[in-house]
Amino acid sequence: MAHRPKRTFRQRRARSSDSDGAEEPSSEPGAPEEQAAPGLTEEGPPSGGGRVEVTARRVRGRGPRGRGRVWASSRRAAGAAPRAEGGSGVPESRVVDLSTDEEGETPHSSESKDDQGSSSNSSSSLEEEFSSIAPRNEETSEESQEDENQDIWEQQQMRKAVKITEGPGLDLSYSSEPQTVKKFDTSISLPPVNLEIIKKQLNTRLTLLQDTHRSHLREYEKYIQDVKSSKSTIQNLENSSNQALNFKFYKSMKIYVENLIDCLNEKIISIQEIESSMHALLLKQAMTFVKRRQDELKHESTYLQQLSRRAETSTNESLAVDEKTQWILEEIESRRSRRRQARALSGNCDHQEGTSSDDELSSADMNDFQKTQGDISQDHKKIFEDVHDDFCNIQHILLKFQQWREKYPDSYYEAFISLWIPKLLNPLIRVQLIDWNPLKFDAIGLKQMPWFTSIEEFMASSMEDSKKEDSSDKKILSTVINKTLIPRLTDFVEFIWDPLSTSQTTSLITHCRVILEELSTCANEVSKGKQDLLKSVVVRMKKAIEDDVFIPLYPKRTVENKTSPHSKFQERQFWSGVKLFHNILLWNGLLPDDTLQELGLGKLLNRYLIIALLNAIPGPDVVKKCDQIAAYLPEKWFQNSAMRTSIPQLENFIQFLLQCAHKLSRSEFRDEVKEIIPILVKIKALNQAESFIEEYHLDHLKSVIKEV
């Protein structure tokens, strides 16, 4: 520590005292000198130790005054004088200085001002007194030098004490910017401050800091525990091979499913385009057949009407027929001739004109159709040619999910995979169904389809692995049928199916029976898709009855000749209606009985077929037609053994049979009556049959009724 330069204060004071001791000014202005003199007189001449104490007090009084702490040192000076006589010296001065620093928080009080004034006066008086009695010799000089060194040391210690006691209350920072000193308004009275208040405030702050510290400690401990737990978890995962394998498996499945979805999303546009192309091709062909049949029916009917008018006028002029009608009639007859030749070669001689489907295409049209269909088939095979089997083969995809179900069944069922599998397989199944036509007799069946067998195997393994009786995987097949297969069947029914075609109807019903039976075994709830499909069937058959059934009525003299064009046309149209009647009743077991009775009996039999029969001449042909109509009626409608009267919708048919039997019994075809009684018995018109037998005494036919 650097020492301050030597002071000449004491020497100057001594010289001035010798020359003019009366003119010594006081340390503070306005302080009277006579107040300090008596004190020194009472104390007497100070000894060496007392002289050192007085000097130290004088230096301490002048040194810290520049820092504003003078009032604290002066207030203890009066009480320190008696202790100086005992020779305590410097240590007493340090104790007084530190104690005054504790009370230095109120420097502007009135008590401080009084102490400051008295301290200045005392110091000045003591200085004068000390200067006047102190001898100037070598001993004094040596003591003065020692006192000066002691003063320097004490001043350094006092500075340290001031810095320690002031603490944060003293701004010790040095700033280059000038600081403005605020003037204190002495008129404002401050609240009294004592040690208790300061101590209370410090204790309060200490309590707050301790609470904050404890909170931080708790937070720190929590973080430490979290870090330890995380490290432990990481260590366990790193050391546990099962967890690592689980994570690896789930990650691989996530990546696989994402890639599968991306693949299907990219290919679905191509699938829809090819589906639309195939549907448009089949729709165009179906519309071609329907339009051709209706046009040919219109032109042939118009031609026969013209023949009837010419016959009525009895003119021998040739009938003028336009070229289009002539070409259509020739085309119709050409196709009929080819069908007759084909039936003759096959040995089918029991065929009725008008029951054929008449769906032949010309060679050019057939070639165009086959070429377009082949192109579509080639395009549909190229959809997944650039895709790995794991993303386009249904069996491979199901195998992935089967592995998941076997390894981690809980997470498999919690993820509701059974709800997602039908959605993932939908595009792939639709691709397999692009070439599938349920209207063809050689179309592949449901249970032979590859996707069906793959799903069945997946469900079977689920029932073996799962301990749950109500496993959600059991509904996968029913969901696929509902969401994928039935909508495609509905499209065929609404737009492509021809109800007048027996081959198409038979094939369609076969597929529908298998599909709906499979659906009923997989799902107990009523399927909306099934309801929509059957509703479409009913709507399409109603439209066929309204648009395609036409049985003309000609005078009896016109149709008596079975070889006449009118008779042949009427026969063909009647048997066409009977064929539609048969096709409608083939839906027995799929459609409700009341719906079939309304369509087949109410709208077709009673409205068209019975009228044509009433216009016909009773004979073997009429009996044959009635027998064929009765043969098409479902047997389950008449299985009630207690039933003696037939269903209400057959009342008109029964009355026609009785009327026909009455006419035949009086004609040359009397033996044909025995063919009518079995018809009445079959349709449960037993009361009417018994009445007719009793009326005409046909006792040999009673056995027919008894057998029922």
Image (cartoon, grey):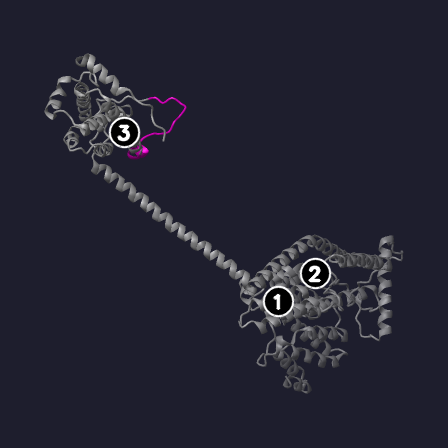
Q: Residue at x 68, y 62 (%)?
A: 489
Relative side of 101 to 403, left or right: left
Dominant secondary structure of the residues highlighted in magenta in the image: loop
Q: Nearer the viewer, mark 2 or mark 1?
A: 1
Horizontal and vertical percent for residue 429? 68, 62
What is the magenta range?
Answer: 164-180
Residue 166, magenta (yes or no): yes
Question: Is residue 225 shown above or below 33?
Answer: below
Q: Mark 2 — residue?
A: 392
**Residue 598 in which image quadrant:** bottom right
Horizontal and vertical percent for residue 189? 21, 26
Horizontal and vertical percent for residue 208? 30, 43
**Residue 500 in which image quadrant:** bottom right
Say the numbered circle drawn on residue 403. 1
- In the rendered image, the quadrant that contains the N terminus is top left
Q: Mark 3 — residue?
A: 150
* Amino acid type for the residue under numbered disc 1: Gln
* Amino acid type for the residue under numbered disc 2: Cys
Residue 440, magenta (yes or no): no
